[in-house]
Image (tube, rainbow, N blue to C red):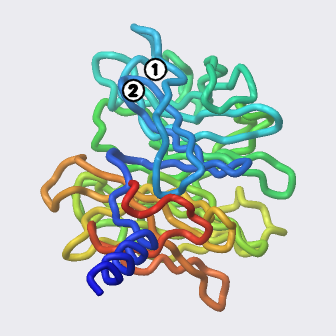
Amino acid sequence: MMMFVDVVAQTQLSDVFTNPVGNGADPWVVKYDGYYYVCKASGGGIRVAKSSSLIKIGKMEPVWQPAKNRWNSTAIWAPELHRIGKKWYIYYAAGSSGSPYINQRSGVLESVTDDPQGAYVEKAVLKTGNDPNDALKTIWAIDVTVTTINGQLYAVWSGWEKNNVTDKTPQHLYMAKMSNPWTIDGERVKISSPNQPWETGGTLDINEGPQFLEKNGNVFLVYSTRESWLPSYCLGLLRMKNTGVSPLKPANWIKTGPVFTGTAKVFGVGHASFTTSPDGTEDWIFYHAKKSNKPGWERDMRLQQFTWDKHGNPVFGVPIPPSVPIKKPSGEKIAGDEQ
């Protein structure tokens, strides 16, 4: 009888996992050709992991290290890995030495081969605004993401209205067309500002970490708001009225929120990316949360399944506390006790 109980317990254990699944912030995952690739800023550069498992992140392999004394030598933030055409591109923010937080700009790396874990070369600094007095002739920008809508490639990012001498500057979401994966073509358009009660009220008004989410012909931007170093950090949602309208017109985006917030046991949820289970039948959110309710940037990475309501909007639910068992993603072959 004892042996039977042990076998049952082991079987039940293999069907679940617990958060967190990794250490760090700004989690990015992309599913391609049966594998999950996680891109992360680490060791002063950028690394990419490969795994057939969603809940078990693979070994982080270094793919790019910045040179010294350049615009992108320090403060590398929130890299994202995208496959566009036959190449892989990594979008990231970085700063120069001295005061990196007020010097954050966004760049693009391009893969040398078809291997997302292979070498990358610097392709460009993105022109996220026009400032003739800036050394790079552009404006402060972080958290660049890209997608294609109706055959047109677009970039969205978090930026300042103009360059400033303090990082205590409000951040907005901007969008622009791209003529290729490394070139913003045309003027930026501000599509969202922190102007709702749930986006304001703290020491700094922020919209950042935008991520595209698409389902059944609907296009969403899920973004982070409030202060990233506080428990109040949460997610807001922009939904395009329909795909037949221009995404460059702010009136064509409908804002709702907050759509994912912390609890008494989970603090400061934000900066999410999205993927599906190994068999493609479930939708999952990959996000970070603070390790404590104290101010600061000590965070870890977490996963949980989400659903959709009858109007086609994502329903993220309530963040599940650490160590609480979560049913493994459908088709997941890694046992819960092998994490």
Relative image position of residue 122 (x, y in whole percent): 61, 18
Q: In this view, does 70 lie to the left or right of 106?
A: left
- In the image, residue 284 above or below residue 168: below
Marks 1 and 2: CB-CB under 8 Å?
no
Q: Whole-Å distance between the Cαs marked 1 and 2?
A: 9 Å
Mark 1 or mark 2: name the one nearer the start of the chain: 1
Disc assigned to residue 72? 1
Q: In this view, does 1 lie to the left or right of 157?
A: left
Camera-side residue: 195 or 2? Answer: 2
Relative image position of residue 175 (x, y in whole percent): 64, 49
Camera-side residue: 285 or 241? Answer: 285
Corner quadrant of residue 2? bottom left
> Which residue lies at the image location 69% right of the left edge and 29% below the top edge?
115
Q: Can residue 197 be seen in this view?
A: no
Corner quadrant of residue 124? top right
Residue lying furthest bottom: 310
Residue assigned mark 2: 103
Amino acid at the residue labelled 1: Asn
Amino acid at the residue labelled 2: Asn
Q: Residues within 10 Å of mark 2 (few under 14, many from 20)?
A: many
Q: Element at badge 2?
A: helix
Q: Element at badge 1?
A: loop
Q: In this view, does 200 lie to the left or right of 77?
A: left
Residue lying furthest left: 294
Relative image position of residue 87 (x, y in whole percent): 76, 31
Camera-side residue: 98 or 291? Answer: 291
Q: How crowded is mark 1: few (under 14 residues within 10 Å), some or many (20 or more)?
A: many
Looking at the image, is mark 1 or mark 2 nearer the viewer? 1
Disc assigned to residue 46? none
